[in-house]
Amino acid sequence: MYPDMLVIFLRGILHMRLFSKASRYAIRAMMSIPEAGSPPSFSTKHSCERAEIPEAYARKALQEMTKAGILKGIPGRGGGYVLLRKLSEVSLLDIVLAVDGENTFAECPMGLRCESQTVARDLRLCEKCNLPTPKCGLSHVCPIHDLWKRTRKSVINYLETTTIQNIRNNPGRVPSHARE
């Protein structure tokens, strides 16, 4: 890689967020809720207070997680949400994809739109691809495509193998299964 391209890449990484503020708040909200079956439901307000996050972001994120089958909404006065799976079965990737959508990791870090045709379900194919003209239709690939591909693979692996329960049990520590 050319030195000037590396500088551009590193600047892009410094300004880039791997996922949205809404996803970060959703993860924090999920860390503050009770385990499935504890109290039957939790309120957005209580969860936001415990997680110290804005309620407006959390409401939208919790709705998206309801659509994804992670939570169930309880309508009416005294309603809230119920966790449909154990916290040990809810990965960070589940939350990020529910809130940010399938194309979260398909964006080129240099903003060249080299992966505009790729969606999350295609990323695993992309990781294994070594063809000069990829089957996914990417004809224009940025100069740091291979580096981003490896980085993205590590990030997705970490998010996929790290659950909310892992984080609650070991706050501030990277689970050993997510290290490379």
Image (cartoon, rainbow, N blue to C red):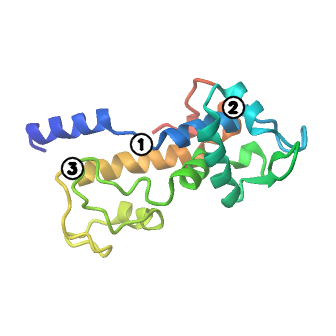
Label 2 belongs to which residue? 48
- Are the two marked residues, 1 and 2, in contact with CB atoms closer than 8 angstroms? no
Classify residue 109 as left or right of residue 7. Answer: right
> Looking at the picture, which amino acid does disc 2 mark?
Cys
Where is residue 64? Give x, y as percent: 63, 54
Report the amino acid beneath label 3.
Ile
Q: In this view, does 70 lie above or below 56?
A: below
Separation (CA) of disc 2 from disc 3 = 39 Å
Query: In terms of depth relative to the viewer, which is nearer, 119 or 79?
Result: 79
What residue appears at the point 71 percent right and 53 percent down from the top-left corner?
70
Q: What residue type is labelled 1?
A: Leu
Task: Pick whichever of labels 1 and 2 is earlier in the sequence.
Answer: 1
Disc 3 to disc 1: CB gap under 8 Å:
no
Which disc number belongs to residue 18?
Answer: 1
Residue plotted at (71% across, 59% down) = 69
- 69 left or right, relative to 19: right
- Which is more N-terminal, label 1 or label 3? 1
Coordinates of residue 106 in the picture (x, y in percent): 37, 57
Q: In this view, does 30 lie to the left or right of 77?
A: left
Crowd rating for badge 3 (residues with CA inside 10 Å; few <14, some 14–19, many 20+): some
